[in-house]
């Protein structure tokens, strides 16, 4: 649907207006909505970026939180120069290294955005090498082992423990191979 | 240029094919977001860095063939005028965001327009594949192959724990956005859809209108896609989406059969009134066009209308949008002129079909 004001951009703001009991629907783009005064700057605060950046500041004001914030203030990515505050405001990373620089602060955000998840479970680039696959397998097996112990399925646990040993061995061999 | 000739160029070849469950699922899409390891994301990259990426794509992938997708063509946004860019948006080959970033944005489009690889969008690479009908698994499998092909020449930004690193935290991990475009007129007519949408959202899926984020479902066309990209494998994400889409197909078919049982004549009347409007109107707005096209599509699926093919409707959804009308008219049109031109184009298209019958 196109914006009914400029007829150029797609309409992204939709609402109904009632004037003298007459209801009419308005479909406009973000820019025209602002230009025509349909939305104020505050309403724009509900955009994805602002919602995201809101997630960074939802903690309480305990001593621990305050010292965490102090540390955030000085955090800056040495590859692209993005500060933690810029990241929190934009809701976007500047480069791949930002993920490492801000690593200690990201889990709460990822948990909120991805239904509690913080670790990748999917495809791995072939170039990243086979030991990422092995390490992931090891991680999965360790979780499985804990579950088997909790379920008191000790025979299964013994089998999983053997698998862990064999993955660890091959991983060790690969890493030694890489070093030499 | 004749309408027939224009259509042949305007409609993506893949859109003319019929896919599985195409009475309800119009198309399936898979998109992967990827970035170069050592270059800042487009949001803050310097001009020279973005230019390097453009040159790289032009040199490595222009006129290359990958699998059955022949002859990728490299198109720089800076080389297109605003109507041409809008046409690509209306064909869903590029995002509105890429069209706006005119200077360093580009896309590689396969000859049949099934694959488009956006360069310097929010991420360095956004590769997307379309399939007609309900074919999510096939789309994922081919997206993986395309990804492997790109990866032979590119070192991706990847982290063992976080997966594919993207500019926005909402895409990190798999970088996968899978979506289907569904026509759900019976669920909309019976207002059942309003009860189902909140449940779909609770399952970590998003429902939007035909033009993505923030747009409403015009012409009863709904886009359903995954929201979560981290912590689940690509196959699991597709499986979840597939499950919900299958349920929606089942409910839509059920609602259609109830409508047919209980108010067949009213439904038939609605379908033929809309068919009449499309065939005979002289001025028609885009919203009414979308509504009428939805009714006629339902009419074909229910067997009320048998003398036209559904592919005409797919064509008209694309052709009646503002940039396409202007492209065909070869001039800028005012909104009123567009409504007149739209009506005449639709009439012309139906007349062409009748001629073809004899």
Image (spheres, coloured by chain):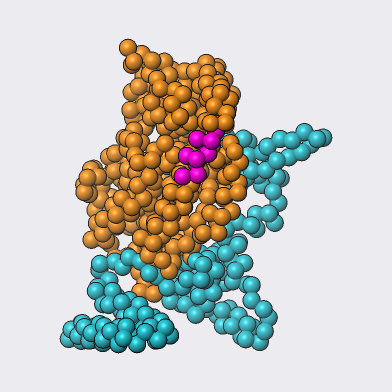
Residue B353 shows in this picture: yes
Residue A108, x across and y down, in percent: 54, 74
Of residue A16 and residue B321, the one placed in the foreground of this image is A16
Q: Output the letter for the chain in orange.
A: B
Residue drawn at x 71%, y 35% as measured from the top left: A24
Establish if B161 lies above or below B17: below
Extreme top residue here?
B358
Does the magenta segment cover residue A119? no
Looking at the image, residue A9 sits to the left or right of residue B236; the answer is right
Residue drawn at x 48%, y 27% as measured from the top left: B299
Give the total of numbered labels: 0
Residue drawn at x 38%, y 26% as measured from the top left: B309
Of residue B75 and residue A117, the one placed in the foreground of this image is A117
Looking at the image, residue B216 sits to the left or right of residue A169; the answer is right
Residue B46 found in image quarter: bottom left
Residue A148, x across and y down, in percent: 38, 83
Residue B207, x across and y down, in percent: 53, 50
Residue A42 found in image quarter: bottom right
Residue drawn at x 59%, y 38% as measured from the top left: B190
Residue span colored magenta: B250-259
Extreme front residue here?
B261
Q: Colour of chain A?
A: cyan
């Amino acid at each position: 649907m196109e914006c009914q004001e400029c007829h150029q951009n797609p309409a992204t703001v939709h609402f109904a207006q009632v004037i003298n009991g007459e209801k009419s629907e308005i479909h406009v783009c973000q820019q025209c909505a602002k230009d025509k005064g349909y939305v104020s700057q505050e309403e724009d605060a509900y955009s994805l970026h602002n919602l995201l950046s809101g997630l960074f500041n939802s903690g309480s004001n305990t001593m621990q939180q305050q010292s965490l914030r102090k540390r955030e203030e000085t955090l800056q990515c040495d590859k692209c120069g993005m500060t933690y505050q810029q990241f929190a405001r934009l809701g976007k990373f500047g480069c791949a290294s930002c993920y490492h620089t801000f690593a200690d602060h990201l889990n709460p955000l990822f948990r909120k955005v991805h239904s509690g998840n913080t670790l990748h479970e999917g495809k791995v680039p072939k170039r990243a090498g086979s030991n990422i696959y092995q390490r992931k397998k090891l991680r999965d097996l360790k979780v499985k082992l804990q579950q088997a112990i909790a379920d008191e399925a000790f025979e299964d646990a013994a089998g999983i423990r053997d698998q862990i040993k064999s993955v660890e061995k091959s991983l060790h061999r690969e890493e030694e191979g890489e070093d030499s | 240029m004749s309408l027939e000739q224009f259509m042949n160029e305007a409609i993506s070849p893949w859109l003319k094919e019929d896919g599985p469950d195409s009475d309800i699922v119009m198309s399936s899409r898979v998109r992967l977001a990827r970035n170069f390891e050592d270059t800042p994301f487009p949001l803050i990259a310097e001009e020279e860095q973005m230019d390097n990426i453009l040159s790289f794509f032009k040199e490595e992938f222009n006129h290359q063939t990958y699998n059955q997708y022949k002859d990728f063509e490299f198109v720089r946004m800076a080389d297109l005028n605003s109507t041409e860019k809008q046409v690509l948006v209306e064909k869903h080959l590029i995002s509105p965001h890429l069209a706006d970033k005119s200077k360093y944005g580009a896309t590689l489009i396969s000859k049949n327009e099934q694959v488009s690889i956006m360069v310097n969008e929010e991420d360095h690479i956004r590769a997307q594949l379309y399939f007609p009908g309900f074919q999510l698994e096939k789309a994922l499998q081919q997206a993986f192959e395309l990804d492997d092909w790109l990866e032979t020449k590119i070192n991706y930004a990847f982290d063992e724990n976080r997966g594919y690193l993207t500019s926005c935290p909402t895409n990190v991990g798999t970088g996968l956005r899978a979506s289907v475009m569904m026509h759900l007129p019976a669920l909309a007519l019976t207002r059942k859809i309003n009860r189902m949408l909140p449940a779909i959202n609770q399952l970590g899926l998003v429902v939007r209108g035909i033009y993505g984020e923030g747009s409403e479902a015009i012409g009863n066309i709904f886009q359903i896609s995954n929201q979560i990209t981290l912590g689940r494998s690509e196959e699991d994400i597709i499986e979840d989406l597939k499950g919900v889409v299958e349920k929606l197909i089942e409910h839509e078919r059920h609602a259609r059969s109830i409508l047919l049982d209980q108010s067949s004549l009213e439904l038939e009347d609605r379908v033929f009134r809309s068919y009449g409007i499309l065939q005979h109107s002289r001025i028609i707005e885009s919203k009414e066009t979308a509504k009428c096209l939805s009714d006629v599509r339902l009419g074909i699926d229910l067997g009320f209308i048998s003398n036209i093919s559904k592919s005409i409707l797919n064509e008209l959804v694309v052709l009646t949008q503002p940039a396409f009308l202007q492209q065909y008219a070869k001039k800028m049109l005012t909104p009123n002129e567009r409504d007149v031109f739209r009506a005449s184009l639709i009439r012309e298209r139906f007349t062409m079909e009748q001629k073809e019958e004899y």
